[in-house]
Image (cartoon, helix red, strand yellow):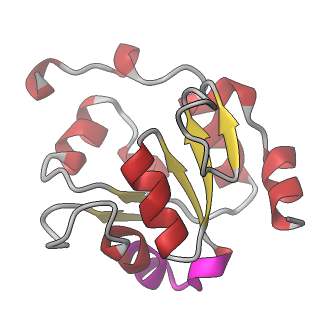
Amino acid sequence: MINEMTPAEVLKGTVNFLTAIKKEGYLVGLGSASKNSAIILERTNLTHFFDVIVDGNTVSKSKPDPEVFLKGAEFLGVEPQEALVFEDAIAGIEAAKRAGMRSVGIGQAEILTEATLVVEDLSKLSVAHLLQMNEL
């Protein structure tokens, strides 16, 4: 339940990864079809990491439609090909691809086969990985 969410429920490595990328000056946006995104970020103490939140209150189409990611890029002031999507679902990876964005799948590589890169969780990712992805 959303009201019971706590920082303890955040995926392993998330806070360290978000801290590192913000320190390097990366812009961070959240793209979700959920209308509860802001509440979830607040309850998990993650709101301060995000420059933009695009959610079900902002968009009308859900993934695999790329609307949420394209709007996020627009609000961040970046071109779609400059954006990198972090996603744990096949529909989200497809939406990123349709938007012309690279993607990091979070979960199982055998399921997220269309992602540019797949990691088990964010503890397996670093700023160096992002720089390598820029070369792809």
Lateral position of residue 62 relative to residue 127, left or right: left
Residue at x-position 41% and y-position 42%: 89
Q: Residue at x 30, y 60 (%)?
A: 63
Residue 125 screen position, x and y as percent: 73, 35
Q: Name the one closer to the observer, 22 or 123.
A: 123
Residue 114 among those drawn in magenta? no
Quadrant, the C terminus: bottom right
**Left-right relation of 83 to 66:** right
| Residue 76 seen by the camera | yes
Question: Residue extending furthest top?
Answer: 8
Quarter location, residue 40:
top left
Q: Position of residue 117 (x, y in %)?
A: 71, 45
Characterize the magenta stretch by its predominant secondary structure: helix
Relative horizontal placement of residue 2, taking residue 110 as reference (left or right): left
Total numbered labels placed on residues in the image: 0
Q: At 36% across and 79% down in the image, what residue appears?
A: 71
The correct choice, above or below, for 39 with respect to 92 in the image is above
Residue 51 visible at all:
no
Which quadrant is the N terminus positioned in?
Answer: top left
> Is residue 7 placed above or below 49 in the rendered structure?
above
Write the start and end of the magenta stretch as one range: 72-81
Q: Is residue 30 above or below residue 90?
A: below
- Residue visible at 22% across and 62% down in the picture: 62
* Residue 98, horizontal then vertical, whole percent: 48, 73
Could you tell me residue 116's position as x and y percent? 69, 53
